[in-house]
Image (spheres, rainbow, N blue to C red):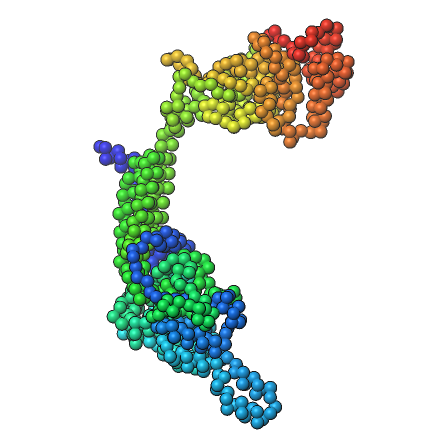
Amino acid sequence: MKLQRLWNKFKFQWFCGLFIVFFCILIHVSFLIPGTNQGEHLKRLEGLAYDLRLEATLSFHPAREFLPIIIVDIDEESIKKIGRFPWSRTTMAELHQKLIDLGVTVIAYDVLFSEHEVNPIDKIISKSQNGQLNQNLTLIRENFNADLEFSNTISDSDTVLGLLLEHKDSLQIGELPNSVFTSKIAFDKLPAPDFSGYVASLPLLQKNALGNGFINSAPDGDGFVRYAMLFAKHNGQLYPSLSLEVARLYTLSDSVSVISEEFGDNYSITGVKIGNEMIPTDDFGRVAIPYRGPAFSFPYVSASDVIFDQVDTELFDQSIVFIGTSAVGHADLRTTPVGVLYPGVEVHANLLEGLIFPQILPSRPDWIDGAVVVSIIIIGVLGAIILPFLELLGIVSYTFISFSGFIGLNAYLWSQYYLDFPQVAILLMLALQVVILGSLSFFNEHKQKLKIKNIFDQYVPPEHIQEIIENPQSMSVSGERRNMTVLFADIRDFTSISEQLDASELKEMLNLYLTPITKLIFEHHGTIDKYVGDMVMAFWNAPIKVENHEELAVSCALHMHKKVEELQSRFYDVGLPRFSIGIGINSGEMNVGDMGSVYRRAYTVLGDAVNLGSRLEGVTKFYGVKILVSENTFSKCKHIAFRPVDKVKVKGKKQAVIIYEPIDLVSSLTSEQKEKIFLHEKAWNSYLRQSWGESLQEFTTLKNRYPCEKLFAIFCQRISKLEQMNLSKEWDGSYEHVTK
């Protein structure tokens, strides 16, 4: 029976969880397995995850061997000392010879030598008209052949020259070397990258170099260089990368074997073999580059220091040298996981180190994609079962444990075993399950709370019910003291109006009035305290704290009067009388909380500040104004324009307070309203100074201009009386009301 209830309660979430598992398996198989042509954005995410893992674990790799690789840099200092680049082949021959003398084993050039250097003798002959001189110069021409000098120097060492493969048929410069590869499968059947053009070294240089390798990079779709091609095809032949060719010479191997296997009607590459060392690759002959660290993780030596014998000779002994350039205008910079301005020559150095020590190459075995699918199934099914039972804290804990656990295990496998375990599909599944199943749990919980809330919303403030649902411990019988704003709104002459209506008409009138008024209070974040016949009492800043509650209450009052004006035509249509309302507002310290007996409770406010708000509503009719607010409320409303109404002592209060009438938003005042407020404040200030003649004249002017406003007539009558009285020095301009 219990299992049946659980099934009925969670079956939809369980089905959703299993669907997410199936969806993420489909995503991985369709888009994230190497060789698929779709899902470029997902591959970028996988690449980003690869980069973050690589960068985060650079310092956690176990102790590893380092190959003695040095980068000889044709840098700004070298150009400053020797001259602009490209240098003469004579200079290159000198640099090469210096390296040979230092005991370097292999020298590799990340530089192209595809053009002949002009012989200075040829320049002289082309300008000279002296036949005998030209004949003599021809005899010594070869002594000044820089290409020949460089070629002869190359022949004295294990040298690898760089070449560039291109996708343009028309671009075929220089001479390509013979292939150093062997394969049981014809080269043209191997799924290696195919190029139609090339830029290679001069034949004169080519014939004396023991090796040639392409310097192309193989960036992913987002431009990051994470993997490297070990070989590529041109015209049915295979050619090695610069690093692979250096590795072949360094290991004294005559050739490189390509290992492949049948894959349906095609073939896939599984690795290359140099001597007796097998180097696993992906299906296309690529390997992940095992970056040592950020740029300049290998020793860099300025080319000028080599030429001028300013180097540590022990550093170069039995080393491998890559020659490249970082000079402005010649720098070959790449975007890599460990740096966005990474020297291309150092990419070759990293790759070479991995080829010599294959154990540090990040590996992605053939079984890895199957392991991803199995992991998705195991983790996904567990998540689908567990998540529907969890509440917020449990979901947060599950999210933290599952994400950190998988990422930590992944980082461990990478740092200890160089295992490139794909991450995106599993992380995507975890994220989707947490978001979707967690949202469904919240939705179900919300539905239950909503049922409770809808039952009680008609009886107590909705915010109060919400707070009770979300935090039952928030209930407090003793209540609390809080700075709040209270509003009282009452229909004027309601007794006489009600006498004109029968019970059903009176009910219809109150419903038509109270419904939009209540909506306005809720929209301005207020809480309805109670309805007492036609009277509405509301307060702000409890049970939920509200910023600027004074201004919200006054703004609500202004909107309430506008709504009443809109209702007049509707009342007329149904045969109901016109009416107006008075509103009183006060702010201050009030007691708020659940108050009452064991039989009935109410969430309400009490205190002197509440009573003052009620008194202010009562005197609106006396002054003939729609809204009155206390000075406490007035002082907090920076965006609403007011005019002072009076300084009063209401019934039951000894302390005089200045009361104000809100007019409108400051930004919405018309020029007439601004002038009226100005004239009123001028008359009011004269009144407080006891400048009776000046004040009477100003209020009389206002009364004549606005004869419908009762307030101006009141002050004219009051000033006429005060002029005849002998006021004490303690008179503060206040007027005492003796009725509510």
Q: Residue at x 27, y 43 (%)?
A: 382
Residue 140 lies left or right of residue 349; in this view the side is right
- Residue 528 vertical placement versus 75 (above, below): above
Percent x, y for residue 484?
51, 21
Quadrant of res 191: bottom left
- Residue 533 vertical placement versus 439 (above, below): above
**Outermost residue toward the left?**
1
Q: Residue at x 65, y 10 (%)?
A: 735
Confirm whether residue 94 shows in the render: yes
- Residue 90 vertical placement versus 675 (above, below): below
Percent x, y for residue 537?
52, 18
Q: Which quadrant, please, contains the C terminus?
A: top right
Total numbered labels placed on residues in the image: 0
Percent x, y for residue 530?
48, 17
Quadrant of res 642: top right
Camera-side residue of 11 and 242: 242
Camera-side residue of 259 and 149: 149
**Outermost residue toward the bottom?**
132
Residue 550 lies left or right of residue 724; in this view the side is left
Q: Residue at x 26, y 68 (%)?
A: 277
